[in-house]
Structure formats: structure tokens, C-alpha cells
Image (cartoon, helix red, strand yellow):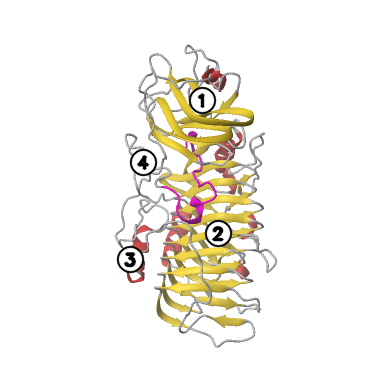
Amino acid sequence: MRRPVALRLQAALGTLALAAATGVVLAMPEAAAAAGGATGYATQNGGTTGGAGGQTVRATTGTAIHQALCGRADSATPITIEVEGTINHGNTSKVSGDSCSTAADKIELKQISNVTIVGVGSGAVFDQLGIHIRESSNIIIQNVTVRNVKKSGSPTSNGGDAIGMESDVRNVWVDHTTLEASGGESAGFDGLFDMKDNTQYVTLSYSVLRNSGRGGLIGSSESDVSNGYVTFHHNKYENIDSRTPLLRGGTSHIYNNHYVSLNESGINSRAGAKAKVDNNYFEDSKDVLGTFYTDQAGYWQVSGNIFDNVTWSEPGEDTNPAGPDPKSNTTVSIPYSYGLDAASCVPAVVSATAGANKGLKVSDGSCTPQNPDPSPDPTDPDPTDPTEPSPDPTDPPSGTNLSLGAGADGSSKASGTSYGNVRDGDLGTYWSPAGTTGSVSVKWSSPTTVSKVAVREAAGSAGAIGSYRLLDHGTGAVLATGSGAGVISFPAVSLTKLTFEITGASGTPKVAEFETYAG
């Protein structure tokens, strides 16, 4: 048993409590929806795009969030839910539908995919109500505060986790969030950011985790080692007892985080876990790295970290601190590129960027906070694309249009239009998204080789299509990007579903034909 530690609550919590009690609205900066792009391990395994290309809706209650999920065409239809206001037990009800599986005591993202939840306007606060991700993939949570979620006492939610993931979860990006509690386990709280039972390809970035007994974990027990490929960067952990995070098996990349007042232990790598720990700043803390509370060893590769007023325990049967002079005992290969700030500037950079309602600022390794990258210039195709598209709709590829007789589906469509209109050979009919962005797909019952696409706009709508992405729907691979309707060429690929995703438009797009060709 570990001894209980009295948590030193910050004055800010008292301010929030007073505001809640008096009904005062705290002014927060305006935030752009789903700005920037995923980083770290969330970019792997096909990437994490959330609800990009789908409908955008606004929600001010938990029930409205559930209604948005349940109102989709199916459980994979992309959607961005902009949240403003306080979400709590009083305004969060269970909603039923074929495209969702929700619960009244939490925000439930269960057995779904392609969803973004982003705080906008005056801010989004999930008060005593956790966010639960289960059997789901391609999820983005950005610019929200989740606070005081309890596993015991009243009210309870999500097992006491602010954000919890479990059971075959893939590709989650949590960015610019504030996750906080008001005490430890004895006060009814559990973890702030937990991953269990085969959760992989996750990034936590530019977030604040504070005033909790437990920061978070990867793996619920020494036998739950199917989790991993998790990145933690530019986060601030403050006044946490332990688990920043606790790693059981798997691989993690932990860089450019600021740790302040870790009261018992910090990064706890055990049960064969491997952690690459780069350019972090540890301050006024104890046992910030090692294997603790078990005899099952974990491993770490360290470089560039600063240890400022850090104390270390003597090694023991269940205690293996990495310090006082931490050395690497493994190597970890990182498959993605990243900008690494010097550890000396991490406190300043993290202070200016991390947490909800901070303007979504980021750093690229220059130690200078900046606005997130804007959307790609629609006139400049992605330089990673193998072939620049050729926008000439009057000169279609030769051969048979493979779309004729195929199937079709897509994101939410405008009233009176049909997915099937894009593969019927009739320029007089068309599909149009419910908003200015959306996606339409052509699909086949067996693998089909495609290397060219011709997108034709309906009469009167020429030029409305702005930026786009062409995707292998099955793998998520981006085959091409560009702007405007026309002919798109790319290396031949065998697939069963091809998706044309409109990510920007100057008006209402109307796709008359989405033609596909083998060559």
C-alpha cells in the first residue's frame, strides 16, 4: 500500500468552483475548430483525421453530442462536433440509434469511428463527466476541459477517468486539453488519461494534467501489455502523485513535457515497457523516472532532459529509480518526424501553449510558440503525393469507367441528392454534401485496380470544389491531394473502396460524376 499524499490544490480550482457556484461565465478566447494536424504515433497506422470531410454540428449539452453521433448515416460517417458550454450529468442523456451506443453517465464514443470533438467559442467544460472511448478508431478530442470525474462518491462517471480508452481502440489524438481532479483515490478520483485492453496509436499533446493522484496509465495490469505506440509531448503534469504515465508493456515516446511537483513518482516503466524520454524538464519532484511498485522491469532511453531539484529514492525490491544519474538501458526507434525543443525552454513553451483555450498554439522545435499550421494551400498539391493531378475534365482517361454499375456511399448528403448519382453516367444528376465539405465513395465487391479518376461538376457549379483528398478507404492511405475538379492520376492501386473527400470549397459542391479508370 502506498501512503496517501495530501494534494496541494491550486488557487485556480477555487476560482473555478466559485464561478460555478455563482453562475459566473468565465470569458475564454475564441478557438478555431480542429486546427492543425495529428502528431506522434497518432500519425501512424493510416493516420488520425477524426471527422474531417464530414458534417459539422454545434452542441451545448451532452445529450446533443450523443444526438449528433446517433444522427449519422452509419457509425463510420465522419462528423465534427463543436462543443460550447458546460457538459454535465444534468444535460447528458442516453440516446439510441444504429450509428451509436451511448450512456447517460459519460460521453460515450463506443463502436464508432471518424469523430472530432472540439471546444469552440467561450470554451467547453466536461464537469464531473468523463469521455469514454471503447472499440473505436480515428477520434480527435481538442480544446476541451475535463474536470473532477469520480469513481466513488457522487456523481460518478467513466470509472473515475477524465479520458479513458479501452477495448481495441486505434488512432486517437487528444490535443490542447485540460484534465484535472481535486484529489487522489481516497477522494474518489482515478486517472486523468488511461489506456487499456489493446489501445494503440495515441498522441496526447499540448495538454495540462493536474491536481490528481494518478496522471494516467497504459495497461490496467502487468498482464495487459497489448497497448502501446503512444506519444506524450508538450504537456504539463503538475501536482500529481504518480503515473505520469505508468507504462505496462508497449512503446512510448515522451518528449518536451514539463513536470512540476510529482509527489511520489513520475514516468513508471514496467512489465517490459520501453520509453524514449527526450528533452523533458523535471522540476521540484521525486523519482521522476524508473520502475516502481513492482519487480517486473521496464526500460528507457534518455537524452537531453533537465532534472531541477529532483530527489531519488534508494533502490529496493520494488523500487528501481533511473537516477540520480539516469542512463539509457534500451533503444527505441521512432517512425515519424518531430521537432524537438531544447529542454531549457520547455517550461516557457509549454506554459504558452498547453491546455484548453490557449489559442491552439504549438512549437516546431524552435522554442517559439506559434499558431498551428494553416490548411494546405489548395493550389499546391501535397509534395508527398506521387503524381500531381491534372485538372482537365474535358480529356478523360481512356478505357472503361469502372464506376458504372459499382456501389456508392459517403458522408451526409444534401436533401434531394444521391450518392448513386456520381456513378450513373448522367451529368444531369449529382451528389452534394450537407455542407461545403464532405466525401463520396465508389465501391466494388472485389478488389479493383484504379490509377486515374475524373471528377465532373454539375452544370452551374463549376469551380466550387476547392481542396480535396483522394483516399484508399480501406487503408486510409492518401493517394492524391489538390484542388478543383478534373483528372487525377496516381500509381495504380488495388482497392475495394475509393473516397473523394472535399476539404474546402468556394460554394456548394455538386459532383455529377466520380469516374474511375484502370489506366
Location of residue 502 with respect to 312 vertically, above or below: above
Task: Find the residue positioned furthest to the right.
Answer: 223
Q: Are marks 4 and 2 in contact (CB under 8 Å)?
A: no
Residue at the (41%, 74%) spot, across then down: 305
Q: Is residue 418 visible?
A: yes
Which amino acid type is marked by label 3? Ala
Tell me the residue that label 1 is attached to. Answer: 517
Q: Is residue 150 visible?
A: no
Tell me the residue that label 2 is attached to. Answer: 229
Q: Are marks 2 and 1 in contact (CB under 8 Å)?
A: no
Question: Which circle, 1 or 3, is nearer the viewer?
Answer: 1
User: Of helix, strand and loop, which one carries label 2?
Assistant: strand
Question: Which circle, 3 or 2, is nearer the viewer?
Answer: 2
x, y percent for residue 206 = 42, 58
x, y percent for residue 411 = 53, 30
In this picture, which residue range is highlighted in magenta?
37-60
Q: CA distance from mark 4 to mark 2?
A: 27 Å
Q: Compare marks 3 and 2 and give the one earlier in the sequence.
A: 2
Report the disc number at residue 375: 4
Question: Which circle, 3 or 4, is nearer the viewer?
Answer: 4
